Structure formats: C-alpha cells, structure tokens
Image (spheres, rainbow, N blue to C red):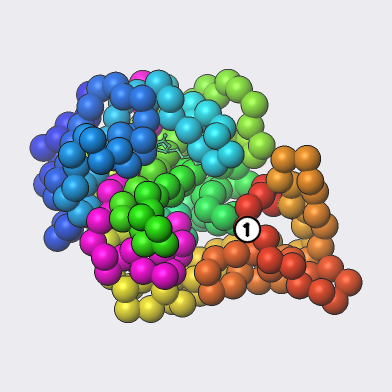
Amino acid sequence: MFNLENFDIKLNTDVIGRNFVYTEEIESTNSFLLNKVNKFNTDGTVLLAEKQNNGHGRNNKVWYSTRGYNLTFSILLTNKKYLSKRFNILNFAASLAVANAIENLYQLRTELKWPNDVLVNGKKIAGILMESISNGIKVERLVIGIGINVNQILFQGNYNIPPTSLKLELNNIIDRERLLAEYLNNFEETLNKFEASPNDILKDWKSKCELIGEKISISEGESIRYGIFDDIDEEGFLLLKNNGKIEKIYLGDVNI
Ligand code: BTN
C-alpha cells in the first residue's frame, strides 16, 4: 500500500504533484491524463496507479509492472511556458531527473540511453513515454509517463534491454514514497532549468549518455541503420554519422 502521508512529508515542490491522484487500477495513467474528457487540467497533476491494464511504452510495447511493487505514474503539463517549440527536450528532463533521483538516494551510477531509457549496470531500470495532444501545431496537453522498476525481482516477457530494479541492484526493499517524492522534487528543479535553458538539460543528459562517439546500429521496425552516434541536436534528435554524412534520426532503438 502506498502511504500518502509519508510521500507528502517528503514532497518539496511548488507545482509538480501538488495535485496528486492515487488509484489502485487503471488502463494507463498516460492515456487517462491525456484524455480531456477526464477533466484533469491542473498543471503538474500526478497520477499514480498500482496496476495498469494497458500500460504501454514506446512503439506500443507493453509496460509490464507487478501490482504494488513499482512506480508507474504520469505527470500532466498544461502551462504554456513548458509547451514551447522545444518541448521534446522535456523527455530528456524527465529521464535526467530519474537518473539524478536514483543517484542521490542510492549512490548508484546511472546511464542514459537515447531517446530516454535509464540504465543501471547496463540494464533498464526506468522508461519514459511522453505523449501530447495538439491543436494544429500548438501542443495543448502534454503527459510524461514514467515507469520505474522498484521492488520487482522477477521479470517475464520479451525485452530489448534486460530489465533490472532497485531491489535487484541494492538487495534492499525500497521506500517507494521517498523515491517518488525525490523524483518529483528533482523533476521540478529540472523543469525550472529547462525554462531557463533547454541546452543545459541536453548538456547534462549527454554527460550521462555513454554511447555518444560509439559505433551503433539503430533499428526501427524492419529498417536498421549503422554509423557513429555523432551527437544529439537542439530538438533532441540523434545525429548518425555515416561516410562523412550526418543523418537525423527521429525514432528507433539504439544498439552498440
Ligand atoms: C518505454 O520504456 O518504452 C516507456 C515506458 C513508459 C511506461 C510508463 S508507466 C506509466 C505511464 N503509463 C503508461 O501507459 N506508460 C507510462
């Protein structure tokens, strides 16, 4: 059972998570907050679910998470100041904040993998899925969904990157309330930084991305591309260098 009081004591934010919604079961926290019909409009609303029946990740992959063991939640952003031209960088802000929260609390070294996976010891500990609704070219609502493997120790299913959890890495039961509060505190700080300078977010993110400069392959559906991971551009796209030419990659799974 998630202890709301313990969580609340540790939450230090002004906006993020001040409207906090807890539910036992839902289809997907992302889909719920994204849908206007559900009438959640407060900027910074956080929806946490113990179990998702249709939790999903990038490329429509299923996000598996055992009831009560992990953190599966979404953050709604409606304030126009975040929904600017470079809103894609919020993806990076969200994964960077996971990495920082884990390092602060547990002194575990984290690595970030493009576009926004968080790894510990080469295994995936958290994933982020950002979804938005636009009216023409204007983004109206933006939801950042985060799945962190916390106390789960058995993982079934097919994974691109082998999964791990904090419990597996530390051999200790993890306090989910403390971790969620630490994450949201960190995310708000990162958001403020984003407002001041999206480039600083990218810079911090890149410093934790070990594949930059390496030979990689990128697969997307049936297609596979090879080259050197040259850089990440201002909008967050991957720049792949091949035969002296740079190609911009919008989507895909990176492998070494
Ligand atoms: C990925 O690694 O592909 C992203 C996984 C994102 C999973 C989270 S769990 C909470 C939120 N609700 C969803 O349906 N997905 C995200």
Q: Position of residue 42 (x, y in %)?
A: 16, 50
Magenta range = 67-91
Residue corresponding to mark 1: 250
Compared with 198, 176 (above or below) is: above
Residue visible at 37% across and 30% down in the picture: 28
Ligand 1: give its quadrant: top left
126 inside magenta stretch: no
Identify which residue, 165 or 252, lies in the foreground: 252
Residue visible at 42% across and 74% down in the picture: 198
Residue visible at 57% across and 55% down in the picture: 115
Figure quadrant of the N terminus: top left
Q: Is residue 104 visible?
A: no
Side of 224 where 195 appears, left or right: left
Q: Quadrant of residue 12?
A: bottom left
Image mark count: 1
Q: Position of residue 70 (x, y in %)?
A: 38, 31
The kind of residue on which mark 1 rests is: Tyr
- Under circle 1, the secondary element is loop
Residue visible at 43% across and 25% down in the picture: 54
Compared with 32, 187 (above or below) is: below
Identify which residue, 204 or 74, lies in the foreground: 74
Query: Is ligand 1 closer than 8 angstroms to the Cβ of mark 1?
Result: no
Q: Position of residue 47 (x, y in %)?
A: 25, 38
